[in-house]
Image (cartoon, coloured by chain):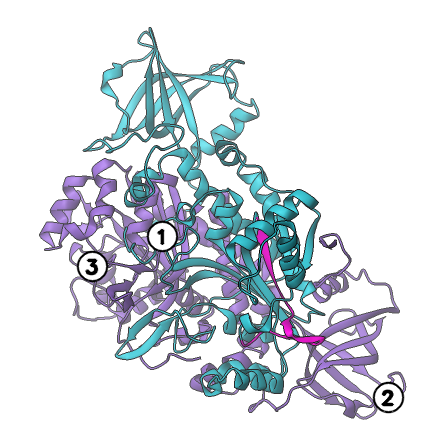
Chain colours: A purple, B cyan
Amino acid sequence: MEYIDIHSERNFNEFEELYAKLEKREIPDGTTVTVTGCIHRIREMSDFAFVILRTARRLFQCVYEPSKTDFELAAIKEGDYVRLNGVLIVEERSKIGYDFSIRSCEIITSPRFEIPFVLNKAKLDLGLDMKLDYRPLSLRNPSERAVFKISAAIQAGFRKFFAENDFTEIVPPKIVSAGAEGGADMFSVDYFGQNAFLNQSPQTYKQMMVGVFEKVFVMGPVFRAEKSHTNRHITEFQGIDIEMGYINSFEDIMLTEARALRCVFDYVTENCAPELALLNVKLPTFDTIPRVRFSEAKEMVAKQYKREFRSEFDLEPEEEKLIGDLFKKKYGSELVFVTHYPTKKRPFYTMDDPEDPNYTCSFDLLLNGSEITTGGQRIHDYDMQIAKMNRLGMDTSLFESYLMIHKYGIPPHGGLGIGLERFTMKLLKLDNIRLATLFPRDVERLIP
Amino acid sequence: MEYIDIHSERNFNEFEELYAKLEKREIPDGTTVTVTGCIHRIREMSDFAFVILRTARRLFQCVYEPSKTDFELAAIKEGDYVRLNGVLIVEERSKIGYDFSIRSCEIITSPRFEIPFVLNKAKLDLGLDMKLDYRPLSLRNPSERAVFKISAAIQAGFRKFFAENDFTEIVPPKIVSAGAEGGADMFSVDYFGQNAFLNQSPQTYKQMMVGVFEKVFVMGPVFRAEKSHTNRHITEFQGIDIEMGYINSFEDIMLTEARALRCVFDYVTENCAPELALLNVKLPTFDTIPRVRFSEAKEMVAKQYKREFRSEFDLEPEEEKLIGDLFKKKYGSELVFVTHYPTKKRPFYTMDDPEDPNYTCSFDLLLNGSEITTGGQRIHDYDMQIAKMNRLGMDTSLFESYLMIHKYGIPPHGGLGIGLERFTMKLLKLDNIRLATLFPRDVERLIP
């Protein structure tokens, strides 16, 4: 019998492991190594050439000298996937403290066609649509790629916080029979002849699971059939959702989010140094986040910018931007919690403020003048929930499973939702959410 | 201005933190503490009572004595959410080394109705349909809940391996214009009047991203509109998918999977001791996994069990079961790699075996006699991919973005896919995949 042995020699981490050792100057001068990657760029100089290798997250400069290598420079070209064998020579003027002098090259595979645009510039000079049409290629540009390395780290950072704080990950269904937010703006699915929908939020499911796991999180797709053409809406996004029981008030949710964000920013800063440098981004560090009531925020902006209210019950995007500006200027914070949104604009599960039922125990978090989180306390009392649904004219029979928690008991609880793509967009100060989405979906775009 | 301060005192981890200290016997005798949870069970004895509190992952036994507590036992009931204040008394005969003697009780919330079945038995005595209909309640039973705590740990264990081995997480779209596996068995979505589908696999997307990140993983929903009524099929499941570049052969994928599984089993064993004990499960430990060719495996089973072949190109579920039995008996392994599946039954992106094009560079992994993984090497050469698609009568124009990687270059690569629910089911030896699915979807079931 033959076996696969987990202790066998093969190792696929070669480059990042090597690079970590280089950064610590642990490799002795003159060591021979093999590096694997794609030839990103060849820069011919008078009597030698730089061959820049693109690996999973680096650009690694190699030196080609005719006298030291056993092949002609013309034998390789940009886009080739290669194994380069060579010698590491200590060189203090080099960024990583070594020169890599090529000895020989094995071409693993060579592309059939040349990429139809210039990939190896620092900034990819391509319009948004071209970038998206050519996603499998445009993301090979290190700056474009960096966004998604950071986006992955944001998810990992959140998970780190969730693990450290005893949140349990749950996987609720995406195909549902009724909508969590009441049913508008949902995509319909033909479910074996039955009409079903793509879920627009894991809201009811995460509330149900508070009764089981106390604190839960979900990271998964959320679908909104909105015909928006803005730079911050897509129809399918990655939701980061939490829900937690035994809260004292919705302030516990804000505190949890503040701590989670601090953990995420620290995690990304620690793990994505090369990508943050490439994009010239420094993440906010903070110990406190200012908070302001919805109505106060509206007044502050009206006063400061001599601006009239239009929508009474919500913040317009322009107002969010101005609140962001104001708090940045006045309190030095890129983040601001806006609390106590009007009852009219919040969904049926939102707990009303006991001191004024026109407002809710809820909040949004703004980052650089744009909403990145909606959260708050939920109703846990059965009669209160039924009364609110009746007031809103909802058919409670569609919510039988959801109402089980109210009927049979659930502790006071609340939570929040974050959209990964919008969060990444705001954090990296990109001007379109599509640049922070691997394969965006909107009214016009369904491919790739 | 008011602020949310991340260093403020509030802490939501109280119980698990306390429990960890109790386990280490770090709490001094006579310490007063408050514990929060749901009253799972009240067991009245002659002159005292046990009040069993259900917390996020424990059953915590508290002692009620009329002489020591300031309330009547009748004031609390099963299902109440409470804060119990009391004293920890060192008691070696107790499982955790302490007795918790109740002093006072604050009822946080009390249910309106009694749960319509007995929740607090060790094993929930309920049929499958009832369990699923009452998911928000039935999962409050510790044994039912344990399955999903382990399922969450399986995901965390995989992510740990991926992070340690430089895999980048990607989030591909679920709404797509064409199918990754050719298009059969897909749910259709009304996408603003356009016909779209729910993706049946992230296959093409993860291959595209090998050219960007070298090694990628996806954890997200996968949809199969199969009208199956078996105990191991659902229409929506959580896929764990990887894809990696610069492989030498599909053996690198098997080795990676073996290492990943070892990491997952170790992680779950380390982090889910109470749940594994509750379910009486011990996870396999292994350093090697036997491997056998598809055709050999078929012959072994035919010979051993005097069984005739029916399907020439695939393994029947019964054959998988017998292979599982055979390898368990003969080689002591619950896991077995079956390699070189017939070309006829593998999808268009599968690399044929250069030594015999009737077979492929692919494998399945069986766990306890059931397939839990399908994987293999993919075609990276443009002409080879086009030729295979033509041979299969596919419309290559639907795969323009996918074929970009073959056209413009991609290193040799391969990967695999695992279904979380089936994996959990087989690992915990459950007899139906629905028991390992939080809210299962099948031909009949769309709620809760």
The subunit carrying tag 2 is A
For the record, the magenta segment spans B348-367
Measured from the top left, where is residue A215 in percent x and y?
Answer: 39, 43
Q: Is residue A380 visible?
A: no
Q: Tell me whether the residue at label 2 lies in contact with that at label 1, contact meaning CB atoms closer than 8 angstroms.
A: no
Nearest to the observer: residue A27 or residue B96: B96
Say whether residue B193 is left or right of residue A278: left
Of labels 1 and 3, the one closer to you: 1
Nearest to the observer: residue A111 or residue A318: A111
The CA span between labels 3 and 2 is 70 Å
Say whether residue A418 is left or right of residue A343: right
Measured from the top left, where is residue B352 in percent x and y?
Answer: 64, 75
The subunit carrying tag 3 is A
Which residue corresponds to the image point at 50% horizontal and 42% vertical from the top-left?
B429
Q: Amino acid at mark 1?
A: Pro
Q: Are marks 2 and 1 on the same chain?
A: no
Quickly name the residue at label 1: B440
Quickly name the residue at label 2: A66
Q: How many marks?
A: 3
**Element on which disc 2 rests:** loop
Say whether residue A17 is left or right of residue B101: right
Quickly name the residue at label 3: A182
> Looking at the magenta stretch, what is its main secondary structure?
strand
State whether residue A42 is above or below residue A340. Answer: below
Nearest to the observer: residue B367 or residue A10: B367
Q: Amino acid at mark 3?
A: Gly
Q: Tell me whether the residue at label 1 lies in contact with that at label 3, contact meaning CB atoms closer than 8 angstroms.
A: no
Query: Few, some or many C-alpha atoms within 10 Å of disc 1 (few <14, some 14-19, many ≥20)?
Result: many
**Element on which disc 3 rests:** loop
